[in-house]
Amino acid sequence: MGYPAGSSGHFLEVSRLRVNIILACTECKHRNYVSRKNKKNNPDRLERRKFCRWCNQHTLHRETR
């Protein structure tokens, strides 16, 4: 099938802005989650409260490099 004419170039530009990130627990340092973010909208490191299965509780997870 393929992409309609003119749309494939836009798709490549948008996908370059989004990068894969890894979220690590701040308490036990396990890397639990993989996510994506837009570097243009969120240039700083991402922080989320998520469930850590090793700590067995919700903890702060930060983006690692």
Image: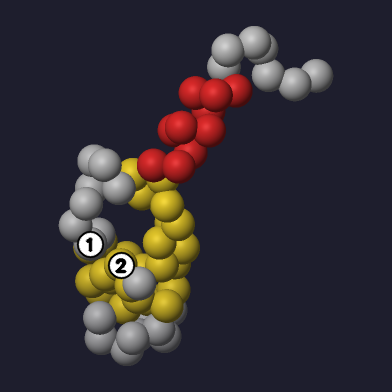
Would you say 50 lies left or right of 12 here?
left
Would you say 56 lies left or right of 43 here?
right
Give coordinates of residue 58: x percent, y percent.
28, 71
> Which quadrant does the N terminus fall into?
top right
Identify which residue is drawn at 22% across, 52% down: 43
Amino acid type of the residue that numbered disc 1 sits on in the rendered structure: Arg
Identify which residue is drawn at 46% across, 63% down: 34
Closer-to-camera residue (2/55): 2
> Which quadrant does the C terminus fall into?
bottom left
The answer to which quarter of the image holds residue 62 is bottom left
- Secondary structure at numbered mark 2: strand
Q: Where 17 sits versus 58, above or below?
A: above
Give coordinates of residue 31: x percent, y percent.
42, 78
Residue with the mark numbered 1: 45
Which residue is farthest top? 5
Q: CA distance from mark 2 to mark 1?
A: 6 Å
Would you say 8 lies left or right of 25 here?
right
Identify which residue is drawn at 48% across, 38% down: 15
Are the two marked residues, 2 and 1, in contact with CB atoms closer than 8 angstroms?
yes
Is disc 1 surrounded by few (<14), some (14 to 19) or many (20+) residues within 10 Å?
Answer: few
Give coordinates of residue 32: x percent, y percent.
44, 73
Q: Where 44 sits versus 12, above or below?
A: below
Give coordinates of residue 63: x percent, y percent.
30, 67
Give the numbered dot on residue 63. Answer: 2
Would you say 7 lies left or right of 16 here?
right
Amino acid type of the residue that numbered disc 2 sits on in the rendered structure: Glu
Query: Counting residues from the N terminus, which is met first, the one under dot 2 or under dot 1?
Result: 1
Identify which residue is drawn at 49% across, 23% down: 10
Query: Residue 17, can we see it?
Result: yes
- Secondary structure at numbered mark 1: loop
